[in-house]
């Protein structure tokens, strides 16, 4: 009897939810966009040209009038040089004051249009002047000819700079890259990996590795890539079968460890299960590490089994975390965007006026009844406290893995983040969007939201494309927009005192032609000035070759952070409270023989210590037993450890505190 009653209650609740689903008013123009193909099918040779629309005479007022410089970089055989989502392809290093732009090359003839080659544009001195750039440095070539195309042709790359901790010499730093290739072309076109490194001075000091299609673990197209100064590289692949084009139920994860002898990363591969609703594939996957390299977060956009969004098949962020440099991971968890347990910063953003003009009523839907979804790409960063930040577009969810647009302010860019290691989540609004997707021939590009941080990780910056032209419904004449977030002050930037984002490319050489932007995960810092390394690609026809454009001089000053948020400040989180209760210091660091460990406790605690290497192997352990409150000091003999990077982890009554240790 109880079971029957429970089933009846569930049915009633289900009908109530259906009845409460908001309806859009008739006459309100709304366009629904569904998740696009991850990769467009591209022509090998094409003479088709699509003329870019002329710039409208009128420009939206109220935007930033500081006109930026635009520099010319390398070229690609077609618009797909920056295709298929928000991969890291621009990467700046603050210690070296250098920036790279990594992309497909071209035009050329061997292989056709050189579109199977990958190249680097290298900018020294912050890339501030045209003379600072060396474009088209070939880092990967195609050698394995086959029909209808070359098996090892590189596509859709990810790239980073590996600069060892403390290094300020360019010749000691390397490009590191990861890209899919055509090793499985007989079946579908993709399925293998091409990856390697190249010294930033001695280009002959380089490597190229191929990993052919393997169904266990599945290999397709990597979306996420991150490299730490401590010598770790992380790759994550979204888990589509290249033969059936269906989701395989897990993501493929690659973890690389720097090999100083071969000057290369040695990768191992594993899988992580992420079960999804109706086995619908993940829209995007990303990975990033904290500034000290200790904590790593992995994210995906999708709907997990067991999650409770208001609309089936809507997307929300899924996250996993590692506290041991990516060796082990937590189980995946979903962030609730909507409903009673949703994020207030998202649910409360729409004004009463907006709700009453957009939805059918009265009665109008409550804020707990409006369904939300993420867009289909995103970017992540990790702050100084080891907490995750997600830069993503959020919009109304009509259902069916789609997002609605066509109404100004219906789509908005947020920073979704935690201040307590994932125990709870909040969102800060960054900017409103007018359009969503641009289409050129069969090639599409969404807003491309990127998130960046300063080196120490207490400021976040957001960039994205939008077309804000009256009467335009498509994002085909985009500018780049930006906003900054000071996590310590809990303030975001203004546009000359106005509470809005900045139009970076306003009145520049690429006004409303700043296509497919890409921003470095790290910004340049000069005292209280923060310069965002931003690239776009430009072309008169998107089946023809394009040129990459670099913006060297868009920056925020500390005085630009003037708009307070209503969210809890980042330092008032679990990580900060732990620092108040436990203090760990290992010195000297780097060390050659004996290291001193100072541990400050606020109460009597049971303490154990372990030392692990970069691959997660424990090389030393100390059981200190019960230690009294106060400052305690003891020695640790590192003379038997080989040169390299290690992690010293102190376990205090079950809570772990880690510090990186460099052994010389």
Image: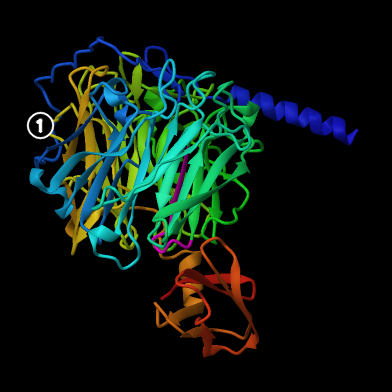
x and y percentages locating residue 259 in the rendered image: 44, 58
Name the residue at 29% across, 60% down. Answer: 172
x and y percentages locating residue 82 in the rendered image: 31, 31
Which quadrant of the figure has residue 621? bottom right
- Residue that label 1 marks: 509
Which quadrant of the figure has residue 377? top left
Read off the magenta span: 285-294
Report crowding for label 1: few under 14, some 14 to 19, many 20 or more residues within 10 A (C-alpha). Answer: some
Name the residue at 63% across, 49% down. Answer: 331
Residue 459 position (above or below residue 26): below
Residue 540 position (above or below residue 273): above
Name the residue at 80% across, 30% down. Answer: 7
Q: In this view, does 116 lie to the left or right of 127?
A: right
Residue in front for this viewpoint, 359 or 523: 523
Name the residue at 10% across, 34% down. Answer: 508
Is 653 inside the magenta-drawn segment?
A: no
Q: What element carries label 1?
A: loop
Image quadrant occupied by the C terminus: bottom left
């Amino acid at each position: 009897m109880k079971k029957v009653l429970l089933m009846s209650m569930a049915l009633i609740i289900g009908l109530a939810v259906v009845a409460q689903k908001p309806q859009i008013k008739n006459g309100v123009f709304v366009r629904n966009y569904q998740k696009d193909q991850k990769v467009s099918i591209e022509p090998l040779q094409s003479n088709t040209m699509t003329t870019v629309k002329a710039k409208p005479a009128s420009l939206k007022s109220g935007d930033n009038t500081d006109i930026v410089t635009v520099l010319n970089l390398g070229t690609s055989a077609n618009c797909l040089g920056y295709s298929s989502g928000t991969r890291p392809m621009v990467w700046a290093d603050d210690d070296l004051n250098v920036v790279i732009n990594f992309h497909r090359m071209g035009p050329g003839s061997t292989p056709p249009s050189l579109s199977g080659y990958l190249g680097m544009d290298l900018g020294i001195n912050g890339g501030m002047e045209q003379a600072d750039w060396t474009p088209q440095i070939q880092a990967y070539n195609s050698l394995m000819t086959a029909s209808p195309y070359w098996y090892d042709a590189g596509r859709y790359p990810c790239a980073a700079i590996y600069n060892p901790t403390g290094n300020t010499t360019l010749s000691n730093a390397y490009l590191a890259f990861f890209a899919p290739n055509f090793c499985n072309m007989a079946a579908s076109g993709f399925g293998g990996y091409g990856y390697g490194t190249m010294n930033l001075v001695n280009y002959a000091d380089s490597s190229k590795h191929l990993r052919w299609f393997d169904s266990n673990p599945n290999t397709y197209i990597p979306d996420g890539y991150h490299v730490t100064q401590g010598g770790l590289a992380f790759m994550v692949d979204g888990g589509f079968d290249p033969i059936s084009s269906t989701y395989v139920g897990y993501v493929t994860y690659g973890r690389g460890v720097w090999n100083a002898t071969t000057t290369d990363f040695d990768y191992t591969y594993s899988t992580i299960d992420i079960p999804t609703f109706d086995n619908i594939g993940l829209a995007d996957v990303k990975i990033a590490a904290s500034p000290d390299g200790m904590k790593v977060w992995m994210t995906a956009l999708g709907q997990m089994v067991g999650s409770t969004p208001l609309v089936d098949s809507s997307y929300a962020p899924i996250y996993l975390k590692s506290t041991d440099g990516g060796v082990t991971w937590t189980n995946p968890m979903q962030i609730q965007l909507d409903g009673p347990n949703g994020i207030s910063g998202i649910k409360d953003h729409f004004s009463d006026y907006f709700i009453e003009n957009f939805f059918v009523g009265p009665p109008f839907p409550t804020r707990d009844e409006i369904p939300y979804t993420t867009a289909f790409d995103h970017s992540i960063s990790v702050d100084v406290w080891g907490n995750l930040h997600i830069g993503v577009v959020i919009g109304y969810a009509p259902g069916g893995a789609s997002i609605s647009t066509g109404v100004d302010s219906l789509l908005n860019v947020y920073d979704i983040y935690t201040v307590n290691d994932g125990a709870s989540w909040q969102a800060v609004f960054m900017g409103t969007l007018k359009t969503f997707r641009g289409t050129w021939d069969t090639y599409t590009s969404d807003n491309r939201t990127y998130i960046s941080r300063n080196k120490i990780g207490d400021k976040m910056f957001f960039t994205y494309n939008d077309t804000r032209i009256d009467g335009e419904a498509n994002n085909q004449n985009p500018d780049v927009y930006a906003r900054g977030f000071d996590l310590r002050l809990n303030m975001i930037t203004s546009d000359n005192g106005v509470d809005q984002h900045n139009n970076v490319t306003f009145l520049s050489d690429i006004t409303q032609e700043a296509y497919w932007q890409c921003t470095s995960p790290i910004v340049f810092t000069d005292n209280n000035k923060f310069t965002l390394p931003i690239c776009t690609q430009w072309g008169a026809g998107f089946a023809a070759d394009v040129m990459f454009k670099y913006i060297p001089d868009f920056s925020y000053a500390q005085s630009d952070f003037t708009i307070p948020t209503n969210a809890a400040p980042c330092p008032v989180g679990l990580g900060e409270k732990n620092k108040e209760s436990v203090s760990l210091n290992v010195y000297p660091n780097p060390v050659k023989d004996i290291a001193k460990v100072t541990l400050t406790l606020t109460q009597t605690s049971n303490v154990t210590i372990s030392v692990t290497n970069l691959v997660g192997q424990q090389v030393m352990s100390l059981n200190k037993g019960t230690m009294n409150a106060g400052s305690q000091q003891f020695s640790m003999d590192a003379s038997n450890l080989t040169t390299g990077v290690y992690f010293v982890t102190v376990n205090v009554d079950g809570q772990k505190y880690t510090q990186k240790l460099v052994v010389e």
